[in-house]
Amino acid sequence: MAGQYAKPRSSPTEMVNGVELASYRGDMCNSQAADPEARKADPQRMLKGYYLSAATLNLLRAFAQGGFSSLHNVHKWNQEFVKNSPVGGSYEQSVARQIERTLTFMENIGIHTDMPQIKEVEFFTSHEALFLDYEESLAREDSEDEVRGRWYDCSGHMLWIGDRTRQLGGAHIEFLRGVRNPLGMKVGPSHEISNILDVIQQLNPDNEEGRMTLITRFGAGKVEQYLPPLIRAVKGEGLNVLWCCDPMHGNIRKSLSGCKTRSFEDILSELQQFFAVCQIEGAVPGGVHFELTGKDEQTGDVTECTGGAAGLSDEQLGRNYCTACDPRLNAEQSLEMAFRIAEMIKES
């Protein structure tokens, strides 16, 4: 589960209604309000972000360990999706009922399904380590004698470094190479392979398995150009990495009305290309990275990304466009995407 109250920006300023303002850098820094005072960095926002994150984690723990995540509830999780989505019936037939039949079979042969592995789910947290003042304040030295001297950033389990902040000799790499957390690194089309190899070796000098994840974000239609040479170079150096696909950030476009959006079809296409290239190159597609949001009970599903089974169009984006940063998949689109990924894994 990833969160991001901090937003990397390409420019320190932006034009809003003809006025140049400091860029909005996420709620943990400043406000998106079009006002010079609101755009000033406020350190109190980091404290608010910390408390809101803690409250969110408490809610997630309650869901994960309180029975809601039990596989016995597989039909309850997505009742509205099954009822309203054109692909909901297919999900119910091919996924939910298979799980139900498997549990029934286990019980019939004497395997108890009232166990934590069935009733609970383990989850981990992640975010981009963008605000180093925040990350540094949450760094702790392990107290166990046998590993004394090892530092961990306790703001999350896994931290990633962005496509804009992975400069050799830069502060972000210097900080992250000093902590023992699992690390991710975003890689976009502008990368240089030699630089990526150098950064991996800086962050994981012992070539430890599980330490490094490369999160590719090339965009639909560009995966076959950039991913194969990157995989070959990493394998050629004998570097241990996990391959993950971020199909969101390379597929942003402007809608007819001028707002940022993403196409469900472009996102799915990049995923399909990622899986295909990994299979050809002998790499394991180990993860996916999405930006999504659940249904708002007052206003309904957000309308920020086009497409999907419901066929959301550019003209419909204004119905419930809520994001302060990047467009997100809504609840129905997210479930449909998860179902499509399950199909890809089953077929591979």
Image (tube, rainbow, N blue to C red):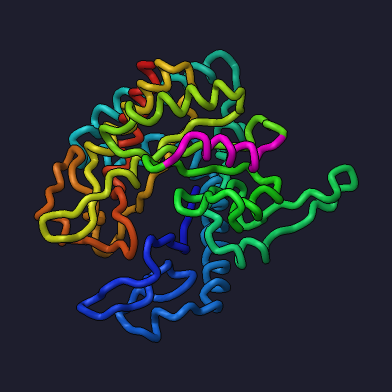
Describe residue 93's horizontal placement relative to residue 238 as left or right. left
Describe residue 80's horizontal placement relative to residue 241 as left or right. left
Residue 80 can be seen in this image? no
Q: Nearer the viewer, residue 78 or 267?
A: 267
Give me the residue at 67% from left, 31% from top.
207
In the rendered image, residue 316, in percent from the top left (x then y), is placed at 12, 55
Q: Main secondary structure of the magenta part?
A: helix
Magenta segment boundaries in residue numbering: 191-205
Specify the quadrant of the image occupied by residue 270.
Answer: top left
Q: Was residue 129 drawn as part of the magenta stretch in this picture?
A: no
In the rendered image, residue 78, in percent from the top left (x then y), is placed at 33, 41
Q: Nearer the viewer, residue 348 or 68?
A: 348
Q: Nearer the viewer, residue 192 or 166?
A: 192
In the rendered image, residue 12, in percent from the top left (x then y), is placed at 40, 69
Asked if 306 appears above or below 276 in the picture, the reply is below
Residue 70 can be seen in this image? yes
